[in-house]
Image: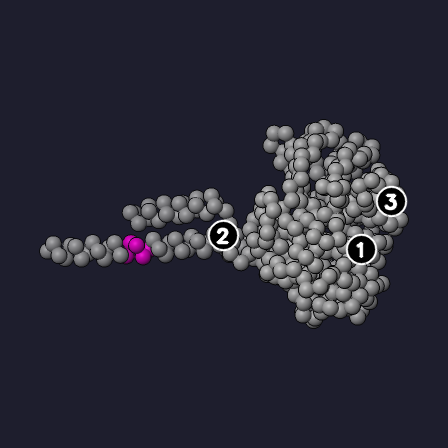
Amino acid sequence: MFRSKWMMVGLATLLASWWSVGPVHAQSGFTPGQVVVWRVGGDANYNPGGSALSAAAAAVFLDQFNPLTASQTAPTFTVALPTVVGTLAQTNAGSASTEGFFSRAQDSTQLITMGYNAAVGTASVGTSNPATINRSIGIVTDLGTFNTTTGFNNGPSGNVRSAAGDGSNNFWATTTAGLFHVPAANFGSVQNATNIAAGNWRNLRIFNNSLFGTSAAATPGVGLSLVGSVGTLPTGAASTAVLPGTGSSGTGTPSPYGFWLFDNPLNGNNWNGTGFDTLYVADDRTAVNGGGLQRWVYDGTSWNLSDTITFTGGVTFRGLAAAIDTTGQPTVQLWLTTSTASANQLVTITDTLSAGGGAFGTFTSLATAPTNTAFRGVDFTPVPEPTAVALLCLAGIGLGYQRWRRSCRERDRAAGLAHSAAE
């Protein structure tokens, strides 16, 4: 009875301590709640590149930064994506500012990456034929491990742009030549992908099991588009519908890249059954033409541009990630990468929402890309798979139980020796 009672107390204490500190991560992995930026060029130690970025293939790194600490001089963790052809490699065209827009999987357990199966230094990879230089899609876990064995070898020549996934090895990828679907059945192989929507696509994300993508081309349409139906991820030929209003702003053609959708609890509208009424877009046009961080608000009929803000000196943006806090006055924290060609920055800003708009704060620069490197996309660190958390918890319980058993044996042995000595 004594042992049983204290075993239960020990297990309860262990469980309480487990849930209070959260999941345990190896020091070599990502830290929960941090931001990750895609860096082209340089090395895994965050050193400058040896020469200026060009159209040739360059190495890619995923750098983790604290989400709110200003002027960080180096990432806290870095994953170097593979550069060996055949595994598959994941390089980018160094000077292609349209590439490098990864995303966190819908279930948050992976980062979904995209590149070329080409060695560093391969000339003009952005105009290469996929049959010759396969396009590779990768997954990166919370531990920093990656798998880039999946790819596709069809479609016209064109730059890789971005990739998204559901966390179950179903992928969607955009290029200048279309939007492609790679099914889970193709995981670990290079096969033909299904071109589900024609056109010149840019960034791609999944929100609430719906697929969205940006474009600055007539096909699929300028602005942000829903691909397929609300609540269903497309696997075959899909219709596209531009969110009404997002195709027109400023002077000339809008140039949207990163984006994020939210439900503002102060706004009772809901676009097309998606639940969303607030949209942020990173537009890389010059400030005078309407570029910058844009906030769009849905009024029940159309999406209207609520405000646009630029970084110091009128600098605009390409990469974008955001998170909302709805406790009290709703606020959105945004992370962006600037559109400058060299020494571009990772910055953050807060937006305090109102029913019909909001009020932006001031920008904080978190990090600057080293010389001859560039920041591209930005997203959040992946989290452990639920099964992994459960196994870690069970392992912790087993360890605690074994320690308890050992302490009981030692106590009983000591008690027995004491009793013998007394006799």
Question: What segment carries the magenta color?
Answer: 405-409
Numbered disc total: 3
Residue shown at the point (33%, 47%) measured from the top left: 6
Ranked by sequence position, the earlier of labels 3 and 2 is 2
Left/right of residue 199 with respect to residue 50 in the rendered view: right
The residue type indicated by label 2 comes to Val
Disc 3 vs disc 1: which is toward the camera? 3
**SS for callout 2:** loop
Ranked by sequence position, the earlier of labels 3 and 1 is 1
Numbered tag placed on residue 71 in the rendering: none
| Disc 2 from disc 1: Cα separation | 37 Å
* Magenta span dominant secondary structure: helix
Residue shown at the point (41%, 48%) measured from the top left: 14
Numbered tag placed on residue 253 in the rendering: 3
- Image quadrant containing the C terminus: bottom left
The residue type indicated by label 3 comes to Thr
**Mark 3 packing: few (<14 Cα in 10 Å), some, or many (20+)?**
some
**SS for callout 1:** strand
Residue shown at the point (77%, 48%) measured from the top left: 257
Q: Is residue 256 above or below residue 127?
A: above
**Mark 2 packing: few (<14 Cα in 10 Å), some, or many (20+)?**
few
Q: Position of residue 49 (x, y in %)?
A: 67, 62
Residue 244 or residue 289, whichever sits in front: 289
User: Was residue 297 drawn as part of the magenta stretch in this picture?
Assistant: no
Q: Position of residue 127 (x, y in %)?
A: 82, 64
Q: Which residue is mark 2?
A: 24
Q: Which residue is mark 1?
A: 179
